[in-house]
């Protein structure tokens, strides 16, 4: 074990800690000394435990590829099941790789990841992530470019964890839900219509979810006792994966993503609106998300 290098970003009242070697992840985001994202412990950083980071990029897809069987353009590829004991592949390979610092300023860092075909992903590609702090908050941009000679399926996302404290309320709008079965894959071939349960701010405590919500309007707000956090995402991210374990783990993950869970297999079966993109050689796609912080309306 060794301590991984940390990039410190600072702007005004905000500080962000970035760990390029740990999946290009954020270890912390603080505003006026308050943890806006669930902070990684010193031990998690020392041991390189990416799932205990504050946020990490999902590239070149979000969530699961069922039974680690990738279907694309009539071809099947067996991937590595990278999240044992599950039989699936999850979140791509970016979160499990070391990223390279390309540019660094006081409040901004650009990371890149060059990938050659392997058991995790059979296409050559380049991922790039830009993390910036400014007066409006934290901004993250994530892109993927197909460097292969074949068309490449793709999707992108972010996996931020927010602290769950007593009384925190969530407000978000979506129109449907892809419910996950016991196998952690979508139960059907279309989202179920759902009236927005969080159209008005509602307590998060006691809510249990590990589903993908569709028709999200790109805005989610968490209201704490002394501050409010506003998550926004670009137009391509109209799916929001919500992981609220509802147990002793004091966090909620709100994940803006471009594709639904198991999107490639669903698209291969002719399901529409999965968010799966097919990139021609040298073609790119990009998403972005921001986390803004301000005084709570309840303070």
Image (cartoon, rainbow, N blue to C red):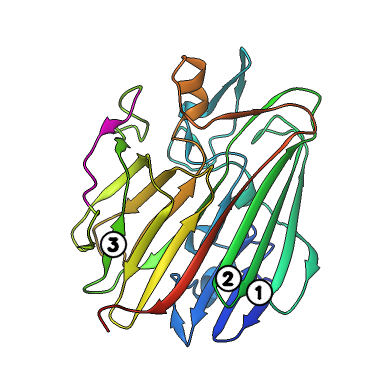
Asked if the residue under mark 1 is in contact with the one under mark 2, i.e. CB atoms within 8 Å, the reply is yes
Q: Residue at x 52, y 69 (%)?
A: 44
The image position of residue 212, as x and y in percent, is 37, 41
Q: In x, y percent, where is residue 276?
A: 55, 30
Q: Is residue 44 left or right of residue 297?
A: right
Relative to 155, is 254 on the left or the right? left
Q: Which residues are magenta?
A: 190-197
Q: Mark on residue 118? A: none
25 in relation to 175, above or below: below
Instruction: Check disc 2 and report its element: helix, strand or loop.
Output: helix
Q: Is residue 196 magenta?
A: yes
Query: From mark 2 to mark 1, how far is it between C-alphas?
Result: 7 Å
Q: Is residue 229 magenta?
A: no
Marked residue nearer the N-terminal end (2 or 1): 1
User: What is the crowding at mark 1: few (fewer than 14 residues within 10 Å), some, or many (at least 20)?
Assistant: few
- Vertical placement of residue 35 versus 47, above or below: below
- Where is mark 3, residue-wise? 170
Looking at the rendered structure, the secondary structure element under dot 1 is: loop
Residue at coordinates 21% horizontally, 55% vertically from top-left? Answer: 207
Viewer-side label of 1, 3? 3
- What element does badge 3 sit on? strand
Q: Which residue is mark 1?
A: 3
Q: Considering the image in quadrants, where does the N terminus appear?
A: bottom right
The residue at 74%/39% (across/down) is 145
Q: Residues within 10 Å of mark 2 (few under 14, many from 20)?
A: many
**Can residue 69 be seen?**
yes
N-terminal label among 1 and 3? 1
For residue 45, the mark is 2
């Amino acid at each position: 074990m060794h301590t991984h290098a940390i990039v410190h970003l600072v702007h005004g009242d905000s500080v962000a800690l970035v760990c390029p070697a740990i999946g290009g992840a954020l270890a912390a985001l603080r505003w006026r000394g308050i943890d806006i994202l669930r902070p990684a412990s010193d031990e998690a950083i020392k041991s390189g435990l990416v799932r205990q980071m504050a946020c990490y990029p999902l590239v070149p897809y979000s969530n699961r590829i069922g039974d680690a069987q990738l279907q694309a353009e009539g071809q099947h590829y067996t991937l590595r099941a990278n999240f044992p004991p599950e039989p699936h592949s999850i979140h791509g390979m970016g979160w499990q790789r070391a990223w390279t610092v390309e540019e660094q300023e006081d409040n901004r860092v650009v990371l890149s990841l060059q990938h050659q075909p392997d058991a995790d992903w059979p296409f050559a590609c380049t991922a790039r992530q830009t993390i910036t702090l400014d007066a409006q908050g934290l901004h993250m941009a994530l892109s993927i470019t197909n460097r292969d000679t074949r068309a490449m399926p793709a999707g992108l996302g972010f996996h931020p964890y927010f602290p769950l404290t007593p009384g925190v309320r969530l407000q978000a709008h979506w129109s449907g839900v892809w419910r996950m079965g016991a196998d952690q894959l979508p139960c059907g071939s279309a989202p179920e219509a759902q009236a927005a349960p969080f159209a008005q701010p509602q307590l998060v405590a006691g809510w249990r979810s590990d589903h993908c919500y569709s028709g999200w309007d790109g805005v989610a707000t968490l209201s704490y006792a002394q501050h409010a956090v506003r998550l926004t995402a670009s137009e391509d991210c109209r799916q929001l994966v919500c992981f609220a374990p509802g147990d002793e783990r004091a966090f909620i993950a709100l994940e803006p993503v471009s594709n639904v869970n198991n999107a490639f297999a669903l698209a291969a079966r002719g399901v529409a609106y999965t968010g799966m993109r097919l990139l021609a050689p040298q073609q790119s796609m990009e998403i972005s998300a921001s986390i803004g912080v301000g005084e709570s309306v309840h303070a």
